[in-house]
Amino acid sequence: MYTDLVMDHFSNPRNVGEIEDADGVGQIGNPVCGDVMRISIDVEDDRIADVKFKTFGCGAAVATSSMVTEMVKGKTLAEAAEISNKAVAEALGGLPPNKMHCSNLAADALHLAIQDYLTRAGREAEVPLILAALPKGHEHSSP
Amino acid sequence: MKSVYFDHAATTPVDPRVLAQMLPYFCERYGNPSEIHRLGREARTAVEVARAQVAAGLGAGEKEIVFTAGGTEADNLALIGYLQRFEPGHFIISAIEHPAVMEPARALNRLGWAVDFIPVDGDGVIDVGAYEQAFRDDTRLASVMYANNVVGTIQPIAELARIAHEKGAAFHTDAVQAVGSVPIDVGALGVDMLSLSGHKIYGPKGIGALYVKRGTRLTPMLHGGGHERRLRSGTENVPGIVGLGAALELAQAEMSTVGPRLEALRDHLARGVLESVPDVRYLGHPTARLPGNVSFTVRYIEGESMLLQLDTHGFMVSSGSACASGSLEPSHVILALGLGAEEAHGSLRLSLGRENTEAEADAFIQVFPPIVEKLRQMSPLYVKG
Ligand SMILES: Cc1ncc(COP(=O)(O)O)c(C=O)c1O
Ligand code: FES
């Protein structure tokens, strides 16, 4: 049911862990299925210099977390903010329909980490500009 | 990589000895049992021999066995076929039934039947007091599974059947997981109906049977040529029926040697896991459980990810986690034991079968702790103590 790329990211996840004294941390939980994802970032010159994740969830949740960290490393905050849930799923070669919601977790946790960074840096005003689509409560679509 | 199959509660391989008995009924003895000529008579004989084998395996009479297309159909026939004869009233099932009982119960509920779901204790044993209290004047049927497919707990069926009869209701048990693994005698149990399935006992998929005690009246669900004493129309699945009979006869013959061996293997695996991984909770009853069932939850990590990691190491197991279920709900069985959703997410089931060895169990005990550690390192819920 999973693509080889999903299985690769699941079996050998990239960037697992937690950045100590991170510049921004985003955590999101899925209330229905009870999964939790936490992404921490370090930011230099408005670029994501380092990123790590921790995930409690299924194979798709782990793989999307791993993939999103790969996708954003070195990106500007604005570029990172544009990464959508769909883009993460596509980068993995697709997810089974009943696992699409897991990909929401990864991009949303990332966006929350960026928001956290901006807030801490006293740049709340930029949050709406950079993040058009901050997660509004977690929607859970059943297959 | 060598693969190890620990998922016998999901399905079993067809035993080659069973297959050998089935094969002639595809291309050589392909007759329709309803026909009078030689090929028809040969097929009829094969069906009736299998019926006698199944009856013998349950301590039943041959006329009390109805062949169905599997356990699901047997359960549906028991609930719907039995209750359809009455004006809608009330019936009782346990909270941990398989969907094959749970869903027909819900369907009957939508047709106007009241239903009570009787809770279980932390070991998965039905609350007999609550069960007894649930009966009403218009209770027609109680259905409680013999052994649970997730945690393996075996219920006090004889007692439950006796109570149902005292209250004037009939009693059905879904024994799909129990038949072939533990000795069953319908007379001693006192049940009115009992379901079984071929593919859980080294027989083929898509064949099962319902034991219907003499005098128990059912309305058929499939109407047609009146096969199976009018209870299940449709030309008989002769190779499947032959396979079911052969599989049950074989399981009966080997039960006294296979059963104790599986129990020892089960307890060895359970001990190995509990001793090598912290924060694991064993699920189900410690002793009143299926010989091949090892069920537990692992804190801080999720079942599907454990299952996939084990799969990449060659071990095939099952999980009751929400993520593994497809429905995105954790197993209702594990929630019914009183576990929280987070713990239910970490559930794993190993179900052993007669071809499993101690070397395979030892290999699992070697491979499993590092997998748990790896996933825990990845978990935001895990704080190493
Ligand atoms: C307890 C129980 N009842 C019913 C069934 C359904 O049987 P079948 O797959 O033959 O329809 C199963 C297995 O899937 C089961 O474990
Ligand atoms: S995290 Fe639960 S289904 Fe993916």
Image (cartoon, grey):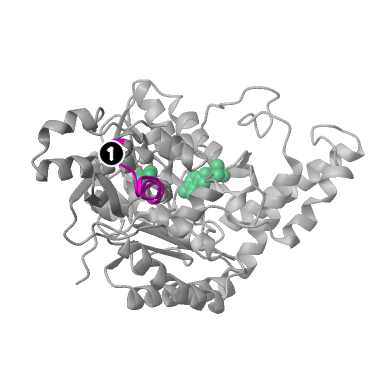
User: Residue B344 versus residue B191: which sits nearer the camera?
Assistant: B344
User: Residue B269 versus residue B233: which sits nearer the camera?
Assistant: B269
**Magenta stretch, main secondary structure class:** helix
Instruction: Name the residue rendered at 31%, 53% in the picture.
Output: A55
Q: Quadrant of the C terminus of chain A?
A: top left
Q: Is residue B377 above or below residue A66?
A: below
Q: Is residue B144 above or below residue A54?
A: above
User: Residue B293 versus residue B366: which sits nearer the camera?
Assistant: B366
Relative to residue B249, is residue B44 drawn left or right?
right
Instruction: Name the residue rendered at 22%, 50% in the picture.
Output: B129
Observer able to see residue A125: yes
Q: Which residue is mark 1?
A: A108
Asked if ligand 2 lies within 8 A of label 1, the reply is no
Residue B81 in the image, given as x and y percentages of width and height: 50, 30
Residue A77 forms part of the magenta stretch: yes
Observer able to see residue B214: no
Relative to residue B11, is residue A82 drawn left or right?
left
Residue B267 in the image, given as x and y percentages of width and height: 42, 75
Residue B116 forms part of the magenta stretch: no
Q: Amino acid at mark 1?
A: Asp
Residue B290 in the image, given as x and y percentages of width and height: 45, 63
Residue A28 in the image, given as x and y percentages of width and height: 23, 43
Q: Secondary structure at mark 1?
A: helix
| Neighbours of disc 1 within 10 Å: few (<14), some (14-19), many (20+) | many
Instruction: Name the residue rendered at 45%, 24% in the picture.
Output: B84
Q: Magenta residues? A: A64-78
Relative to residue B239, is residue A129 drawn left or right?
left
User: Residue B375 versus residue A65: which sits nearer the camera?
Assistant: A65
Q: Residue furthest left?
A: A122
Chain of the residue that carries numbered disc 1 in the rendered image:
A
Relative to residue B315, is residue B346 drawn left or right?
left
